[in-house]
């Protein structure tokens, strides 16, 4: 008897995949696997009910802890792609690995998803699965299915899909972000109303401050209360969401090259990313901060691609880990006008000295204020030289005094 494991949500795409895997791909038996990365309870109910109505053997795997840990790793890398904190992207390899594990345990020889041939998720799932010996199947893409065809097929086969499209928008939710796409949103000029949001309130004039504690780049407590990763993220989604924090409306360049309009909500992610960056600003040196931007950008790209287990990522994390040893301390965040703004930071590792930077003192250690005069004279010296050659149409002799002042006055 041949078995195939299907990434199952109970939505239209994955529901039609069940009979198709038998009819078109010749499998005797299909099992459905739903992985919990923090979707709302209603999604599990839908998956459960649909599986039951289909007579589908259904497995639910809780991967919230593992996923939350990855989200917090992404905070250390200040990870965003075109303004999006990668919720869907980071969840995919976690989901793919969990399904693969069930598939292997259950003796499956095939593994399938219901993704279309247009999105990123097909690539992220298959990057994990194609490392295995299982046959990778993508019925929606391979059979060229459209929503219209799927609806007709479901009716014909009397499949348990709630008549219609299961909601107007295509939504993907996990603890790190909620993404909304499709329908009117496909018109980039369409201005969405409040109805597309679920986690965030429209910003009001209200404000609130919270204090987030970090240890080695990981957030560990809010207002002095320690949380495990999942609870920390859920808590901040609620608190920050009430102030309308973390709404993104962007044109996203997908991996295949398609440009799509995406709307996201990610209150906890925005709060933690802003707080983390503020703490790095206090403890890291200028050159560490500058170089880390390159590292972070590459980490983010691999995250977007669903390739967080690439050797490059381990190498980048070597650098990240080294820098994060000092990213310990607290940050005060103020929620205000839909923003989560760092308004205070403190760390025992601060690369900062108020005494030295202050307007009220004259010396920096053993260096006097006037010692900067020499630096000021040299600053921009090559620029003066180069510009004097470029500007030589004036024919006047330019005096290259290092204090730069006299040449101008002589003209
Ligand atoms: N474009 C995003 C990504 O590739 C999220 C897509 C989520 N899917 C959805 N049906 N809303 O990571």
Image (cartoon, rainbow, N blue to C red):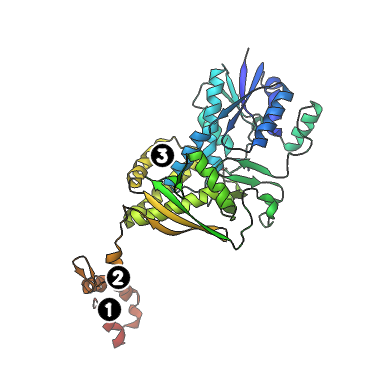
Q: Is residue 286 left or right of residue 13?
A: left
Judge by depth and name the residue closer to the eye, 204 or 7.
204
Q: Residue 92: horizontal and vertical position, in percent?
A: 54, 36
Mark pair 1, 3: CA separation:
48 Å
Q: Residues within 10 Å of mark 2 (few under 14, many from 20)?
A: few
Asked which quadrant contains residue 11, the reply is top right
Judge by depth and name the residue closer to the eye, 376 or 272.
272
Mark pair 2, 3: CA separation:
38 Å
Asked which quadrant contains residue 146, the reply is top right
Question: Which residue in the protein does label 3 denote?
Answer: 313
Question: Which residue in the protein does label 1 denote?
Answer: 404
Mark pair 1, 2: CA separation:
10 Å
Please determine whether, in this image, residue 186 is positioned above or below residue 339. above
The structure residue drawn at horizontal position 18% and vertical position 66%, both measured from the top left corner, is: 366
Q: Residue furthest front?
A: 224
Q: Residue 6: horizontal and vertical position, in percent?
A: 62, 26
Q: Marks 1 and 2: CB-CB under 8 Å?
A: yes
The structure residue drawn at horizontal position 53% and vertical position 28%, both measured from the top left corner, is: 98
Q: Secondary structure at mark 1?
A: loop
């Amino acid at each position: 008897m041949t078995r195939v494991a299907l990434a199952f949500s109970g939505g239209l795409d994955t529901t039609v995949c069940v009979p198709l895997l038998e009819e078109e791909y010749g499998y005797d038996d299909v099992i459905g696997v739903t992985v919990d990365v923090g979707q709302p309870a209603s999604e599990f109910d839908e998956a459960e009910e649909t599986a039951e109505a289909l007579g589908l053997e259904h497995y639910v795997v809780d991967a919230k802890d593992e996923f939350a840990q990855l989200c917090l790793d992404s905070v250390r890398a200040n990870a965003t792609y075109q303004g999006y904190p990668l919720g869907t992207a980071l969840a995919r390899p976690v989901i793919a690995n969990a399904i693969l594990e069930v598939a292997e345990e259950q003796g499956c020889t095939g593994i399938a998803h219901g993704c279309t041939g247009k999105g990123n998720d097909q690539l992220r799932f298959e990057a994990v699965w194609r490392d295995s010996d299982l046959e990778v199947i993508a019925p929606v893409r391979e059979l060229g299915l459209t929503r219209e065809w799927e609806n007709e097929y479901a009716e014909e086969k009397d499949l348990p899909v709630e008549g219609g499209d299961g909601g107007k928008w295509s939504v993907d939710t996990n603890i790190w972000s909620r993404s909304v796409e499709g329908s009117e949103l496909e018109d980039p000029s369409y201005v969405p109303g409040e109805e597309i949001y679920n986690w965030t309130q429209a910003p009001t004039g209200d404000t609130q401050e919270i204090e987030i504690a970090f240890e080695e780049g990981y957030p560990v407590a809010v207002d002095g209360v320690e949380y495990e990763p999942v609870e920390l993220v859920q808590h901040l989604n609620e608190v920050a969401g009430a102030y309308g924090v973390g709404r993104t409306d962007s044109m996203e360049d997908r991996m295949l090259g398609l440009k799509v309009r995406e709307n996201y909500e990610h209150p906890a992610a925005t709060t933690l990313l802003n707080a983390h960056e503020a703490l790095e600003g206090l403890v890291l040196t200028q050159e560490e901060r500058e170089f880390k931007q390159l590292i972070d950008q590459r980490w983010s790209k691999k995250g977007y691609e669903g390739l967080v287990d690439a050797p490059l990522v381990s190498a980048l994390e070597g650098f990240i880990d080294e820098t994060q040893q000092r990213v310990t301390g607290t940050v005060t965040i103020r929620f205000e006008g839909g923003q989560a703004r760092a308004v205070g930071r403190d760390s025992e590792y601060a690369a900062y000295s108020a005494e030295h930077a202050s307007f009220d003192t004259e010396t920096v250690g053993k260096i006097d204020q006037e010692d900067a005069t020499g630096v000021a004279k040299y600053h921009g010296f090559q620029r003066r030289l180069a510009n004097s050659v470029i500007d030589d149409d004036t024919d006047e002799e330019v005096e290259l005094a290092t204090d730069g002042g006299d040449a101008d006055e002589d003209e």
